[in-house]
């Protein structure tokens, strides 16, 4: 292979590696490190969750639940929005939705 072409590909490779390092490090530097309570609050403020809460409360529900748990393998929280139908001891849960909240970016992904 020609020396000029080798130098070109070497330089191109260096630029690509620098870009990958920059993107990776900038992602770490800008991590918001959202807490479990903050993840729950983000979900509670979503328009569809507010509408759901209003609807079930208007229909006689006494409470609703928004619970978060840490997903260590994904560096995110899994947030469950639901109500309990019947009594706490003799009822069942009715799920509205599950949400994945990225701990660094705060990006929210509904499960369904």
Image (cartoon, rainbow, N blue to C red):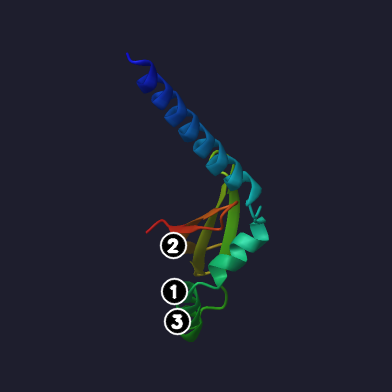
Q: Residue furthest left?
A: 1
Q: Residues within 10 Å of mark 1 (few under 14, many from 20)?
A: few
Q: Residue at x 51, y 59 (%)?
A: 80
Q: Residue 30: x percent and y percent?
A: 63, 52
Along the viewing direction, whichever of 75 and 68 lies nearer the viewer: 75
The disc, 1 or 2, on the residue closer to the chain's N-terminal end is 1
Q: Secondary structure at mark 2?
A: strand
Quadrant of the snapshot with the N terminus: top left
Give the residue pinned by disc 2.
97
Instruction: Please say if the residues under marks 1 and 2 sit with CB atoms less than 8 Å apart.
Output: yes
Q: Residue 84: x percent and y percent?
A: 51, 67
Q: CA distance from mark 3 to mark 1?
A: 10 Å
The disc, 3 or 1, on the residue closer to the chain's N-terminal end is 1
Quadrant of the snapshot with the C terminus: bottom left
Q: Residue at x 51, y 64 (%)?
A: 81
Q: Secondary structure at mark 3?
A: helix
Q: Is residue 106 visible?
A: yes
Which disc number belongs to residue 55?
3
Along the viewing direction, whichever of 105 and 17 lies nearer the viewer: 17
Q: Residue at x 59, y 56 (%)?
A: 68
Q: Residue 28: x percent and y percent?
A: 62, 44
Does residue 13 sit above or below 72 in this rendering? above
Q: Is residue 88 visible?
A: no
Does residue 58 sit above or below 106 in this rendering? below
Q: CA distance from mark 2 to mark 3?
A: 15 Å
Give the residue pinned by disc 1.
48
Q: Secondary structure at mark 1?
A: helix
The disc, 2 or 3, on the residue closer to the chain's N-terminal end is 3
Which disc number belongs to residue 24?
none
Depth-wise, is mark 3 or mark 1 nearer the camera? 1
């Amino acid at each position: 292979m020609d020396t000029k072409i080798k130098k070109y590909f070497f330089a191109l490779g260096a630029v690509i590696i620098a870009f990958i390092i920059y993107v990776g490090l900038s992602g770490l530097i800008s991590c918001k490190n959202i807490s479990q309570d903050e993840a729950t609050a983000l979900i509670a403020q979503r328009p569809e969750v507010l509408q759901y809460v209003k609807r079930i409360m208007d229909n006689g529900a006494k409470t609703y639940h928004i619970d978060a748990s840490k997903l260590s393998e994904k560096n995110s929280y899994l947030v469950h929005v639901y109500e309990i139908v019947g009594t706490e001891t003799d009822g069942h849960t009715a799920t509205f939705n599950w949400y994945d909240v990225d701990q660094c970016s705060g990006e929210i992904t509904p499960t369904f």
